[in-house]
Image (cartoon, helix red, strand yellow):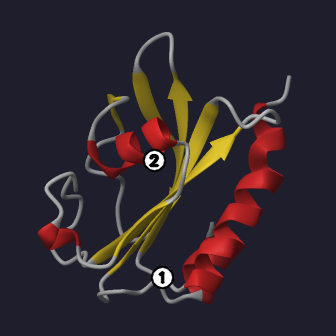
Amino acid sequence: MELLLSRGRYRWVGLYEVDRAAGTVTNIVWSGPGAPEYPAFPIAMGLTGAAISARKTVKVGDVTTDPRYLTAFGTTRSEILVPVLDVAGKNVLGTIDVESERPNAFSEEVRVLLETCSNVIRLLWCR
């Protein structure tokens, strides 16, 4: 978390676990100035819900223009949500959430890096 946070000078990085049976998404670890505003929420809510539903990365350059954004910090301008998929690519096990105070803070290079990270951390869910 700290490496991702400092590498891009982002404000907040979190890792969430998806519990389909309970219909919830729960924060399991974070790094930044404060705990998440929504430590647990329904699976279909927010940008996280969009990433889970699509099983694809959701990148928003200006969250103030996206009604799906769940306000965590009033000064967040951009956010990227990367799903952590099972090996078959069918189920979302978790998500990586990164927020920035800068608009359009996430380049394609960052998206690729975070998607690579999601493939590596998939092992956290293997039992």
Marks 2 and 1, how far apart in space? 16 Å
Quadrant of the drawing holding the N terminus: bottom right
Question: Where does residue 110 sit, x and y in percent of width and height?
Answer: 61, 80
The image shows residue 110, relative to residue 59, as above or below, that is: below
Q: Amino acid at mark 1?
A: Phe
| Other residues around mark 2 within 10 Å, as few (<14) / some (14–19) / many (≥20) | many
Name the element at disc 2: helix
Residue at the spot of label 2 = 51
**8 or 92: which is nearer to us?**
92
Q: Is residue 118 left or right of residue 10?
A: right
Q: Residue at x 21, y 67 (%)?
A: 73
The image shows residue 58, relative to residue 92, as above or below, that is: below
| Other residues around mark 1 within 10 Å, as few (<14) / some (14–19) / many (≥20) | many
Query: What is the quadrant of residue 84 in the picture?
Result: top right
Residue at the spot of label 1 = 106
Count of marks overlaid on the render = 2
Q: Amino acid at mark 2?
A: Ala
Question: Where does residue 10 sit, x and y in percent of width and height?
Answer: 46, 82
